[in-house]
Amino acid sequence: MNAAAVRERYERLRAEAGAHVTVVVATKYVPLAELGVLVDAGVEVVGENRAQDLAEKHARYGEAFRWHFIGHLQSNKVKLVNGICELVHSLDSESAARRLTVPALLEVNLSGEPSKAGVAPEEIGAWLERMPTLRGLMTMPPLSDDPEASRPWFRRLKDLAGEYGLAELSMGTSQDWRVAVEEGATLIRVGSALLRD
C-alpha cells in the first residue's frame, strides 16, 4: 500500500460522502505491519472484524485511530472491545449486550438469510426496551455485483431507524457505499475502495 495514494482516495471519498458521514476503514485484511500506512494517510477511524486482531493492532497503534468493532461480537470478547472501541456496529447477541459498556448499533438481518448475522426487524422494539442506549442500526444486504441492488435494503433500514427514532445508520461497503449515503447512511465501512494497490 502507498500512503499517498491511500490518502488521496480517502480524502476524495470523505469529500464525496459528506461531513455527516463517518468513513470507517475496514482493516480486516490489513496486516499489523502495514497499519502505519493508514496513519500516514491520515485515516481517523478504523473498524476491525476480529477481537484478537483488534487487540494486536491497538497494542501497536492505540492512539493513532478511533477504533470501531464491525465483526460478529462474541460475548467472551466483549471485555476486550469495551476497553478499546468507541462503537460496536454489529450487536445481535443478548449475552454480549449484557456485558457491553460502549455504544452499539443493532445489526438487523433484513433479508432473512440464515447465513447472515443480525436480529429480525420485528425484534428491534424489544431490543430497545432492554437496551435504550442503542444508537442505531446496521445491516449487510444480500451480496450483489450491482450497487443498486442494495438500495431497497438500505431504504428499509432507514425507515426502521426512523420508526424507532434512531439516528445512526451503518450501511454500505466499498462496493455500494454511494447508494448507502444516498439512502441516509451516517457510517460507511470501506476497505478495498481505499486500500487496493
Image (spheres, rainbow, N blue to C red):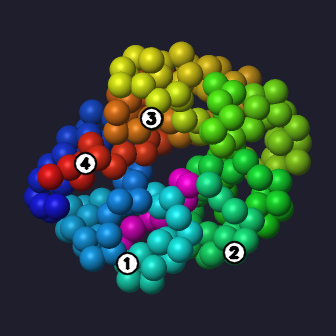
Identity, as a three-letter code, of the amino acid under mark 1:
Tyr
Please identify the quarter of the rendering in which residue 174 is found.
top left
Question: Which label sits on residue 172?
Answer: 3
Task: Report which residue position mark 4 lands on.
Answer: 194
Task: Report which residue position mark 2 lands on.
Answer: 79
- Distance from label 1 to label 3 (Cα)? 26 Å
- Please tell me whether mark 4 sits on a helix, a strand or a loop: helix
Q: Residue at x 12, y 61 (%)?
A: 2
Labels 1 and 4: the sequence-earlier one: 1
Labels 4 and 2: the sequence-earlier one: 2
Question: Which label sits on residue 122?
Answer: none
Task: Report which residue position mark 1 lands on.
Answer: 61
Q: Residues within 10 Å of mark 1 (few under 14, many from 20)?
A: some
* Residue positioned most to the front: 115
- Please tell me whether mark 3 sits on a helix, a strand or a loop: loop
Identity, as a three-letter code, of the amino acid under mark 2:
Lys
From what the image shows, is residue 22 above or below residue 169? below
Q: How many marks?
A: 4
Labels 1 and 3: the sequence-earlier one: 1
Q: Residue at x 83, y 33 (%)?
A: 123
How far across and down, in percent of the image, does residue 3 sit? 15, 62
Magenta segment boundaries in residue numbering? 63-71
